[in-house]
Amino acid sequence: MKREEESGPVGRLSSIIESILLVSTTPLTQERARKILHHYDKKSFDEAITVLQNKYSGESGILMERVAGGYQLRTNPANQDYVRALLESRPPRLSRASLETVSIIAYKQPITRAEIEDIRGVDSQGAIKTLMERRLIKVVGKKEMPGRPFLFGTTKEFLELFGLESLSFLPSISELEEILGSNGEDAGPGTAGDESEPGREHEGGGESTD
Amino acid sequence: MNEKPENVLFSLPLLKFEGPLDLLLHLVRKNQLDISDIPIAELTAQYLEYLDLMRTLNVEMASEFLVMASTLIYIKSRSLLPRHEGIDDEPDPEDMKRELSRRLMEYEKYKEAASQLAEGPVLNRDVFKRMEMTEQDFLSSGSLELTEVSFADLLTAFKRVLDRVGGDLTHDISIDRLSISDAMTFLVDRLTRSPVLTFNEVMDEVMTKSEAVSFFLAVLELAKIGTIGLYQAGPFEEITLVAKALD
């Protein structure tokens, strides 16, 4: 591979990163990019990223998003109908059971099937199977208790599917409580999740079921 | 006609509940009951009414619904009975009620979390990215043990196609013969949309022997110039065309 001379201008660097982003099928992490571009210093790297972020924003048909700990070029949601027409694809369907189950896992991982079912109040084996097949969850270990049941956690694919940079970008439990508190039954869209907060709170209560 | 029919019909779409907690939560919210201090008698009556309705309508019901019904009835009946201090090691109905409140509130949070997730931009529904299925993904997906295809395998597959379309020699009146490059363009176009095709899927398009020849040569040509890879799971298995780098 031909190497650029030291301290290439930011323009050149952003051009390279742009190309890499175009080709990459998975989110491009900082580590990965910096490994490929190790002869550039962090400062110009950050500047190049900013250049691209400005370019791929707003009404651009391609947006540069932070997803699953990396950068990814994605289509602008405003154009979704046309892209879908091109692909002739049906949007992915997630049943309510799967959505509920994956939400519980996202917030409470690592978690066993019994613990999930305790929260949902209903058998969740089917949902877990579907989520495993779609690689949205994975087995992350076994719980140290009789029977050593599997512990489940979410995957990178989960973050990618829902466009989350990391788990901390899920609305926090207290935000959810607020939404529920403010409009009772059916919570409206709300604006939760936009302004990220650094950490999500786990549930306060010292619950130790089972 | 426009009047809302009482209750039953109106609630039909709501009959699909994820479980007893989902149903209870619906009842609590619909009747604006206090979730932290549930009026058990009222809730139990409504809950049982719904179960009856579900039974009448033959809605499939998970066993958890019945377990919850018995729990509710238990709490209700116990709270009506005088308490025997000391000699009682059965669970306290007030505790059970509080536990039920806790579970409902807990469940509601995750239900809300789920709907928040579903509202956000979902990949391949609202937003799209570069498609994933490259040759490498296909090969490393591990679902098939694939080996590269020999020319003899291809010929065997081609022979089967010819046998199928054969006998059209007297009927070849089309002037527009499909050229090899047309066939290549067609294949590349299809592979752009779905990067993995089986040989049979390709040959399903074929109506005449000359088209079959064009397609066959197009497949060979694409393989030669490296646009596609040809694989199969084993001898006599389906031959699969996998797009390499399409631009």
Image (cartoon, rainbow, N blue to C red):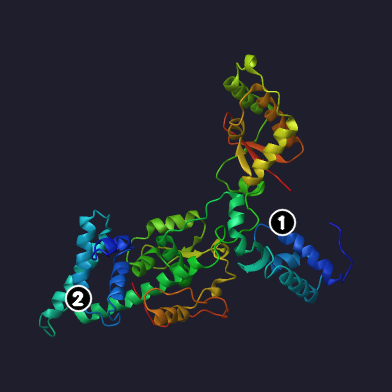
- Residue B88 lies, in percent from the top left, at 14, 80
* Residue A23 badge: 1
Chain label for disc 1? A
- Residue A33 lies, in percent from the top left, at 73, 65
Between disc 1 and disc 2, the foreground one is: 2
**Residue topped by disc 2:** B42
Give the SS element for disc 2.
Answer: helix
* Above-or-below relation of B51 to A172: above
Relative side of A105 to B174, left or right: left
The quarter of the picture where the N terminus of chain B appears is bottom left
Question: Label 1 vs label 2: CA separation?
Answer: 60 Å
Q: Nearer the viewer, residue B3 or A46?
A: B3
Relative side of A10 to B220, left or right: right
Q: Do labels 1 and 2 share a chain?
A: no
Chain label for disc 2? B
Kindly indicate whether the residue at mark 2 contacts the one at mark 1 (C-beta within 8 angstroms): no
Q: Which of B201 and A4 is in front in this view?
A: B201
